[in-house]
């Protein structure tokens, strides 16, 4: 079959920087452990399996610097090993319990135990560094790795602070080069948050492409003909945009009709962490706070089912194949429809948060495997990467886009509403004061430089889009607010001390230990260009 | 990303959320009663979460289960290094951010020292936000009366090819004084909202625009501006 569509499948791997070694166990650190165990290790294993079987596949992944820093952090690696060990212990208990009391869940218990054991073995075999394995796949040309902003800051709300934008981009690119040993060609705009002008800064860092949200084409300032299915030059720059296709993404992403809602798939929200007696489950949750353990025995069944059916992995696997084929069918149909009118082979870009697959949608990794396994000759669909697309792009339109994002409504409402607007008064002020410090105390060395670098570190951590999003989404509100106040409060410690030309050494040592991220940060980046 | 609805939660899970939400006798209520009680508590969020696609996002319920931490001050020990943030900073300044195509968010502060000196100097006066929209085809300027204790405002703006700047102004009986001026922010300008004839002429092209924004059930991506563009085109075609 002739090629009917090229597809860029892009996964975004991000978590906020959560590392609290001051506590023996910290609840929010589980975000990382669950993601590694259920998404990033299984995904890597599948990709390596494909590569070893000489299957040609293409995938694009963006690992955020906060995520990679946590992955490479030795104490967190140790904690992750403890987490897996605890899952193995629970698994062994569960195999016995289900065999005795709940035979319908026995197979699932065995499955979870096996996964925990294999993942632990795999993790140790990798030397606890899964990112090196991803880098290796990139060198072999199977995946394209792209950079992103340092702390996943939502850039449009900082557009008036060029130094802060540069700090986010500079640290993001620097971190990528350090972790993966290659210069990134693509840059993932956090939350697909674009504002006119950001491309000019990215261009200075050698970036060739960015992704844009779906509605950016129809709402653009100029008339565009091909921008939704072909790379398009952004503004007056040499950077190309790849526009996310909402229609195709929605086949998976929709929480009402998406594939993950199928009744045969595993129910994410039913977990023995909530269902079993406290005396039994307590060692595997956080003291007396019930949390997910990862042991989930039920299928979604139906939206309103009180009594859920037990999960049947075999049934779910059959469904995954059907859904993967259906997904490819929809892509092909779109491609054929476009070709009938324009005689073009479109390039569709489909972006997801990576932890949807495996973590939220248990069968999602298998779904990715199935679509990547598909044969281009049979399906007419050619999986590719944005950089590869640019290699055969001869002529591009030029698009002048408005500010936009992939958030609800397509603008900044999610990160700027009644719950979180208060943040910007403080983060903007911290940036202004950081600029002032960089101007008043340029090129310092030794202790003062460390003190100022710590201030810069606190500013970029406070800029993370995770905090306003959590406040908006009303999930871990208390934690997000505390983290924000912590970073901004810590920045003020440096600011007030530096105004007295003093360095609080004891505080600095503790702060550096607490936020061990961006070791190469240079506060001078906050010096406004006009004053250089 | 949320996949499951409240109806799918078990009695145990519902009881757990109800307990966290402070519902009395949560352990004596039936499943239906628990759902009703929780729905009442989350009523506002619930209605907000009904998107234009008709999809019931229902995030609060699942968030309540997966991420509920109770009162953070009781549950989470203090993190070290936390300092209390000031409510305002001692400066007179104004900032504007783009919230969406039709609204700007504006925040400001007036240094306490400045306020004292205005009181001494002028006695009585009023404070205004002066909104200045400068567009290629359309410009407008208007005032919004604000109180002394106000520190933020949402400002409605037109969709024009231009920008907007907001000033903080003090008005006495005799004179206006500029206290602070924001940076200018660009406003949203859409080609397709301003060229309806073109749309009819190029209907096939417009179909391509809409296809990536429409899901398999025929719903369009939730976006006011996309909806406005699509409605306008429909009207033009019907003419």
Image (spheres, rainbow, N blue to C red):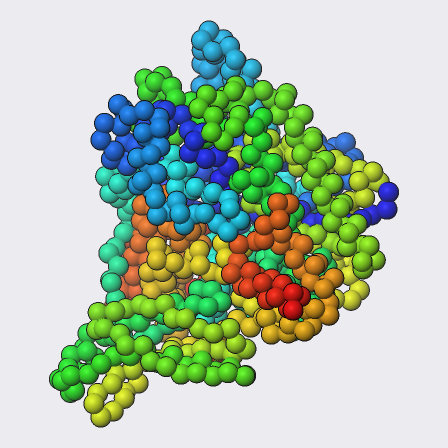
Rendered image quadrant of residue B27 = top left
Q: Is residue A246 above or below residue B113?
A: above
The residue shown at (77%, 31%) is A53
Is residue A460 visible in this depiction of the protein?
Answer: no
The residue shown at (54%, 32%) is A38
Q: Where is residue A283 in the image (x, y as percent from the top left)?
A: 36, 22
Is residue B128 visible in this depiction of the protein?
Answer: yes
The residue shown at (80%, 40%) is A379
The residue shown at (43%, 57%) is A415
Q: Position of residue A505 (x, y in %)?
A: 29, 55
Q: Which residue lies furthest to the front in this view?
A: B239
Please identify the quadrant where the N terminus of chain A is shown: top right
- Using the image as rendered, state which of residue A489 and residue B125 is in the foreground: B125
Give the tally of numbered discs: 0
Q: Which residue lies furthest to the top in this view?
A: A100
Q: Where is residue B137 in the image (x, y as percent from the top left)?
A: 54, 83
- Using the image as rendered, state which of residue B127 and residue A48 is in the foreground: B127
Residue B66 shown left or right of residue B101 in the figure: left
Q: In this view, does B223 lie above or below A250?
A: below
Q: Where is residue B116 in the image (x, y as percent from the top left)?
A: 15, 79
- Using the image as rendered, state which of residue A310 and residue B51 is in the foreground: B51
């Amino acid at each position: 079959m002739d090629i009917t569509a090229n597809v860029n499948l892009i996964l975004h791997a991000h978590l906020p920087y959560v590392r609290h070694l001051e506590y023996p166990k910290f609840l929010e650190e589980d975000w990382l452990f669950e993601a590694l165990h259920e998404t990033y290790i299984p995904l890597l294993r599948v990709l390596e399996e494909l590569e070893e079987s000489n299957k040609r596949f293409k995938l694009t992944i963006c690992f955020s610097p906060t995520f990679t820093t946590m992955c490479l952090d030795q104490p967190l690696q140790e904690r992750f090993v403890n987490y897996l060990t605890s899952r193995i212990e629970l698994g062994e208990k569960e195999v016995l319990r289900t065999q005795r009391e709940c035979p319908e869940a026995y197979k699932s218990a065995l499955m979870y135990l096996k996964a925990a054991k294999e993942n632990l073995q795999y993790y140790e075999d990798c030397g606890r560094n899964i990112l090196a394995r991803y880098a290796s796949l990139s060198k072999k040309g199977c995946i394209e790795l792209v950079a992103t902003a340092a702390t996943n800051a939502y850039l449009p709300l900082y557009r008036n602070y060029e130094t802060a934008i540069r700090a986010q981009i500079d640290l993001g690119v620097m971190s990528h080069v350090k972790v993966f040993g290659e210069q990134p060609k693509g840059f993932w705009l956090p939350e697909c948050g674009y504002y006119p002008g950001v491309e000019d800064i990215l261009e200075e860092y050698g970036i060739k492409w960015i992704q844009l949200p779906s509605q950016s084409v129809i709402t653009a300032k100029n008339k565009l003909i091909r921008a939704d299915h072909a790379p398009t030059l952004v503004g007056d720059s040499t950077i190309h945009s790849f526009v996310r296709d909402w229609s195709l993404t929605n086949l998976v992403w929709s929480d009402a009709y998406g594939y993950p809602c199928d009744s045969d798939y595993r129910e994410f929200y039913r977990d023995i962490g909530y269902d079993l007696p406290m005396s039994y489950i307590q060692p595997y949750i956080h003291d007396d706070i019930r949390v997910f353990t990862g042991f989930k025995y039920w299928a979604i069944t139906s939206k309103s089912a009180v009594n859920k059916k037990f999960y049947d992995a075999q049934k779910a696997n059959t469904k995954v194949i059907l859904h993967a084929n259906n997904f490819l069918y929809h892509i092909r149909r779109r491609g054929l429809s476009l070709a009938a009118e324009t005689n073009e082979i479109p390039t569709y870009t489909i972006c997801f948060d990576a932890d949807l697959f495996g973590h939220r949608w248990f069968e999602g990794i298998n779904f990715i495997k199935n679509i990547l396994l598909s044969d281009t000759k049979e399906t007419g669909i050619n999986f590719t990467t944005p950089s590869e697309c640019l290699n055969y792009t001869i002529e591009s339109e030029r698009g002048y886009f408005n500010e936009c994002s992939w958030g609800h409504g397509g603008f900044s409402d999610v990160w700027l509403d009644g719950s979180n607007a208060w943040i910007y008064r403080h983060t903007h002020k911290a940036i202004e004061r950081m600029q002032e410090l960089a101007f008043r105390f340029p090129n310092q060395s030794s202790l003062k430089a460390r003190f100022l670098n710590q201030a810069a570190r606190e500013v970029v951590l406070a800029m993370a889009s995770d905090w306003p999003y959590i406040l908006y989404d009303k999930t871990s509100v208390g934690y997000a607010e505390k983290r924000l106040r912590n970073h901004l409060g810590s920045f003020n410690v440096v600011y007030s001390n530096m105004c007295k030309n003093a360095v609080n050494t004891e505080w600095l040592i503790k702060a550096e230990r607490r936020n061990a991220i961006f070791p190469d940060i240079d506060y001078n980046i906050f010096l406004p260009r006009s004053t250089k | 990303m949320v996949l499951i609805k409240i109806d799918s939660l078990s009695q145990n899970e519902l009881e757990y959320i109800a307990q966290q939400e402070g519902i009395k006798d949560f352990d004596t209520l039936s499943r239906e009663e628990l759902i009703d009680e929780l729905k009442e508590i989350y009523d506002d969020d619930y209605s907000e979460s009904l998107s234009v696609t008709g999809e019931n996002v229902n995030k609060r319920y699942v968030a309540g289960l997966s991420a509920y931490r109770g009162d953070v001050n009781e549950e989470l020990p203090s993190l070290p290094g936390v300092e209390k943030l000031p409510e305002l900073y001692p400066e007179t300044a104004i900032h504007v951010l783009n919230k969406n195509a039709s609204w700007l968010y504006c925040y400001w502060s007036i240094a306490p020292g400045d306020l004292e000196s205005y009181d001494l100097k002028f006695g009585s006066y009023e404070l205004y936000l002066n909104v200045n929209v400068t567009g290629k085809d359309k410009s407008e300027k208007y005032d919004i009366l604000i109180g002394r204790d106000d520190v933020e405002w949402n400002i409605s703006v037109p969709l024009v090819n231009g920008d907007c700047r907001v000033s903080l102004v003090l008005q006495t009986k005799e004179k206006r004084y500029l206290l602070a001026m924001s940076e200018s922010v660009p406003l949203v300008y859409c080609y397709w909202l301003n060229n309806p004839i073109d749309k009819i002429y190029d209907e096939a092209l417009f179909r391509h625009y809409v296809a990536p924004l429409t899901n398999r059930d025929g719903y369009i991506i939730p976006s006011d501006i996309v909806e406005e563009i699509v409605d306008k085109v429909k009207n033009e075609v019907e003419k």
